[in-house]
Amino acid sequence: DTGVSQDPRHKITKRGQNVTFRCDPISEHNRLYWYRQTLGQGPEFLTYFQNEAQLEKSRLLSDRFSAERPKGSFSTLEIQRTEQGDSAMYLCASSSSTGRNIQYFGAGTRLSVL
Amino acid sequence: GENVEQHPSTLSVQEGDSAVIKCTYSDSASNYFPWYKQELGKRPQLIIDIRSNVGEKKDQRIAVTLNKTAKHFSLHITETQPEDSAVYFCAARTSSASKIIFGSGTRLSIRP
């Protein structure tokens, strides 16, 4: 599968623990986006990278959330001191700044905070 | 702030009939409007998109219309089939780089 891949697919954690998710974009894509999706809702934007630079962050992204894309390829999203309200599907998408800039989504990481 | 409203939240149609989903957006600077289909447990997948310089676009059984003056856009699916059952999301984007703002989704069910 040469699409966007995310790991892990599922994560169960206890409240207060830290979790980290990984996203590998389509190889030639220089833009990478993180979204959060809760049941019955559309994806909500969290943050966006162009190459290694984090260019935009949503107000939804509290201080407990941090994202990195150190080499402009894969990205990680870390949530510190998880809360039950963090339970959601975390989706990654990537796009190319050349051409139509269509965002292609990964299958997501489903986080459950107990 | 930026907002996309989507209606209806659920839609059930007889197989072979047409389905229409409607969206409105708040940011008049929006210039790109994708539609994504998400099957249960799967990733959102782009099914069609339209840019602000076009009023209508069609791809086989799927068409999208855009009214920039009214800030409305719609998805039309004709001759619906069981495999069309899914959640459909409309979305809007204001620049080539910025995030996509999604609607809340429409759960489409096709009755045999």
Image (cartoon, coloured by chain):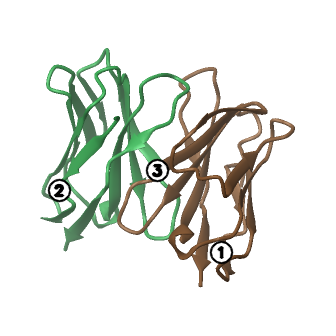
Point out residue A36 in the picture as x, y percentages from the top left corner.
Answer: 52, 56
Residue A102, position as x, y percentages in the image: 53, 33
Find numbered disc 1 in the image and state the secondary structure of the residue it sits on: strand
Separation (CA) of disc 2 from disc 1: 30 Å
Which circle, 3 or 2, is nearer the viewer? 3
Residue B34: quarter of image: top left
Q: Amino acid at mark 3?
A: Glu
Which chain's residue wears label 1? A
Which badge, 3 or 1, is on the more N-terminal residue?
1
The correct choice, above or below, for B26 with respect to A63 in the image is above
Residue type of the residue flagged with mark 1: His
Task: Pick the residue in front: A23 or B44.
Answer: A23
Which residue in the protein does label 1 denote? Answer: A10
Which chain is green in the picture? B
| Amino acid of disc 2 | Pro
Query: Taking the image as drawn, is residue B14 in sight?
Result: no
In the rendered view, would you say B50 is above or below A59? above
Question: Chain drawn brown, letter?
Answer: A
* Dot 3 and dot 2 within a common chain: no
Residue B25, given in percent of the width and then of the height, sits at 26, 34
Residue that mark 3 sits on? A44
Whether pointer 2 and pointer 1 mark residues with C-beta atoms closer than 8 Å, the reply is no
Q: CA distance from mark 3 to mark 2?
A: 19 Å
Q: Residue at x 52, y 23 (%)?
A: B96
Q: Is residue B26 visible?
A: yes
Q: Is residue A7 left or right of residue B36?
A: right
Quadrant of the rendering where the N terminus of chain B is positioned: top left
Q: Residue at x 71, y 51 (%)?
A: A66
